[in-house]
Image: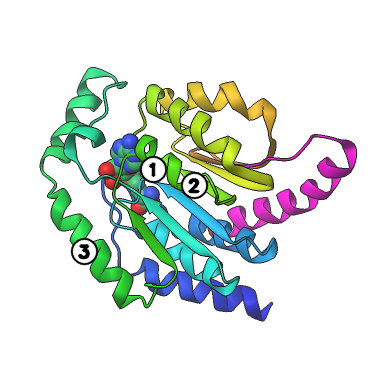
Amino acid sequence: MQWENNLFNRIKDIQNQFSGDFGGGSPLSKCYIMAYLASSFKLKNYVEIGVYKGRSLFSVAPAFEDNNGKAYGIDPYVLDEAKEFDLEENFKNTVNSFLEGLNFEEIYINVIINRKKFKLDNVVEIIRKTSLEAADYFKNIEIDMLHIDGNHDSKHVREDINNYAPLIRDGGIIVFDDIDWESVKICYDEVKINYIILLETNNYSILMKKEKNLQNLDSAEIMSQKLKDLYLKLA
Ligand SMILES: C[S@@+](CC[C@H](N)C(=O)[O-])C[C@H]1O[C@@H](n2cnc3c(N)ncnc32)[C@H](O)[C@@H]1O
């Protein structure tokens, strides 16, 4: 369909301007699937916990712009917040050495520059706080899609679910990143039973907050099949 091609090409153009690195970088297929959901369900408010360089935030934001919505990105850009401890010793040292080599101030400034470059000033709002500090901001904003991709230690992932899942509207979406990390998987396994699973891949999952009755499960199945087809085609 024409709108699907247009959306895909817009996301590809933005993605091409970022290289993924050890600190993050959601792939094109994941971002397209998220944008596809936003367009199909006419979602308005997107909240991303963990922006880093903005590869996923800026890729997904145009789909929310089309719906006259907003894309909120939460990230404190502070080394001590970014460090991960729930990891096997060698991997923990590799991750934290990489993080120590980053200039978070510069990354933040580039995010603000890119927001202008991509003409997304009116759509993307950057909240330079930890997810815990930022939760209050959303007291009066109903979240349509939440992307959990901040600090991956279990304590923080649990905190993100507990603080933000109640703010998601009925029928809203949760995207869990890095469910292949043990610290994230533990939290994901604790809560996934409460949601309808639309897509579960090796490293991310997409859930819908909706009562699991027969009618809802049937209509979710149609979208789920579409997402699985997209994933197989793009991955
Ligand atoms: C894996 S990266 C995000 C990648 C990004 N979503 C993407 O796809 O390109 C994790 C980010 O989470 C941020 N972060 C760490 N602790 C956080 C917290 N408590 N609240 C929000 N963001 C946090 C880090 O600063 C880092 O930029």
Whether ligand 1 has any atom under 8 Å from the Cβ at mark 3 is answered as no
The image shows residue 158 at horizontal and vertical percentages of 46, 26
Seen in the image, is 144 located left or right of residue 16? right
Which quarter of the picture shows residue 42?
bottom right
What stretch of residues is rendered in magenta? 207-233
Residue at mark 3 to residue at mark 1: CA–CA distance: 21 Å
Rendered residue at 52%/38% (across/down): 164
**Residue receiving disc 3:** 110
Mark 3 neighbour class, 10 Å CA radius: few under 14, some 14 to 19, many 20 or more: some
Between 52 and 68, which is closer to the camera in this rendering?
68
Task: Work out whether mark 2 precedes mark 3 in sequence or the reverse, and give the earlier one.
Answer: 3
Specify the principal SS of the magenta part.
Answer: helix
Seen in the image, is 226 located left or right of residue 219? left
The answer to whether residue 183 is above or below residue 83 is above
Q: Pointer 2 and pointer 1: residues touching (CB < 8 Å)?
A: yes
Q: Is residue 23 visible?
A: no
Mark 1 neighbour class, 10 Å CA radius: few under 14, some 14 to 19, many 20 or more: some
The image shows residue 74 at horizontal and vertical percentages of 36, 48
Seen in the image, is 179 located left or right of residue 192? left
Residue 138, labelled with which disc?
2
Secondary structure beneath label 3: helix
Residue 134, labelled with which disc?
1
Q: Amino acid at mark 3?
A: Asn
